[in-house]
Amino acid sequence: MAASAKVHVTPQVIGRLRLASQGLQDGFGSVAECVSKMGAMQAQDLASAFWAVGQRVPGSGLSDVLEALENGTVVRSWPMRGTLHLVPPGELRWILAITTERAMRSATARHRDLGIDAADIAICRELALGHVAGTPGATREELFKVFEGAGQGTKAQRGIHLLWILCQHGWLVQGPPAGTAGRALGQQLFVAFDEWIPESRTLDRDEGIAEFLLRYLRSHGPATERDFSWWSQIPLAEVRKALAAVSGQLVELVFRDTSYWLSPEAAAMLDDGVPGSRTLLALPGFDEFLLGYQDRSLVLPPEHAQKVVPGGNGVFKRMIVSGGRVVGTWSREGTGKGTAVVPEPFEGTLGPAAQRSFELQAAKYLGFLGR
């Protein structure tokens, strides 16, 4: 399909195209490739992020994702929306250069309430870098003790905001898991950015926004310019300028008079029929399939939204996705080898074929965890 083509699609087709773009049909070759192609993957809840990667890298296990964090081929930081993401290490610095100023502005009132000013940040920067230099890194609690010893309070979230600021400016970054106990808790060591990521690509702002937008639309498409602006927190005017620069490398689809953009490779599926009509997946909570878009109604019927995000409290339940649509949630019961994976469809029960597919997904999930 030519990059200039315009075709009309349905919500079901959009959902299945997104499955393909996000590697949920054919998958990526490695953990590092997955995160690089996705651009950034929601990772506030680390266990969910691990399974999000596992669903996109065939044959991978939890140990593979942990290894990627341990060897630095994937890093976890706050590149946008004040939320932790998995990101490719060599791209993080230029992404932060684009997003940090706005993120810091949005936190101004909160930092004023916490009594954090430029002098405090400078003091904590020197303390933190001095403490982690030449070491494997330090836990959050260890750095809090260092700050407290210098009169920098860490209570009432002041400490985590200080660490967020140091990471936001590219002085610190989260590194390897903090030992065996830390793995279970999702704890990571904080390390010096330049020591952990010695090589970073350099892009100016316009180049960076265009690169970030192109990577997003190739991995999340079909998606709109507004989806990307919300996802990245980059102003819409700059997104539109970037889209003009990269649109020749994409295909435009029109749905309800709105333009959706995706890669030519994904759009080519429209010629022979988009796969995935019978694909059933057990996705984690916070997965990019849902969280990667401002408008989620195309894949999650609005009447069922509260079942995925009860009370709109920002906590997303694990999702059952069938044919590119969210059709239910699922839960874990028990621990260890006694862990059970239980489907909770929105309506009725899963049919025999869907139930069998779900059981295969449950087995894949438990196998990923090593159970």
Image (tube, rainbow, N blue to C red):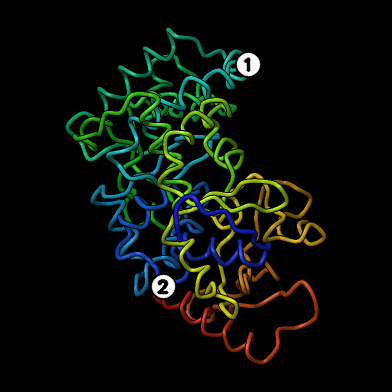
Q: Amino acid at mark 2?
A: Phe
Residue marked by disc 2? 368
Q: Residue at x 53, y 79 (%)?
A: 362
Q: Residue at x 39, y 52 (%)?
A: 182
Q: Residue furthest right?
A: 303
Work out which quarter of the rendered image holds the C terminus and state it: bottom left
Horizontal and vertical percent for residue 323? Answer: 62, 73
Q: Amino acid at mark 1?
A: Ala
Dot 1: element: helix
Left-right relation of 52 to 226 = left
Q: Residue at x 24, y 34 (%)?
A: 200
Q: Residue furthest top?
A: 119
Using the numbered discs, state the Cα–Cα distance from disc 2 to disc 1 in whole angstroms: 42 Å
Q: Is residue 87 above or below residue 205?
A: below
Q: Residues within 10 Å of mark 2 (few under 14, many from 20)?
A: some
Residue marked by disc 1? 109
Horizontal and vertical percent for residue 186? Answer: 44, 51
In the figure, residue 342 lies in which quadrant?
A: bottom right
| Pick the front one: 273 or 24 | 273
Left-right relation of 137 to 209 = left
Residue 251: assigned label? none
| Pick the front one: 123 or 204 | 204
Q: Is residue 41 above or below residue 122?
A: below
Q: Is residue 60 above or below residue 237?
A: below
Tally of numbered discs = 2
| Pick the front one: 168 or 204 | 204
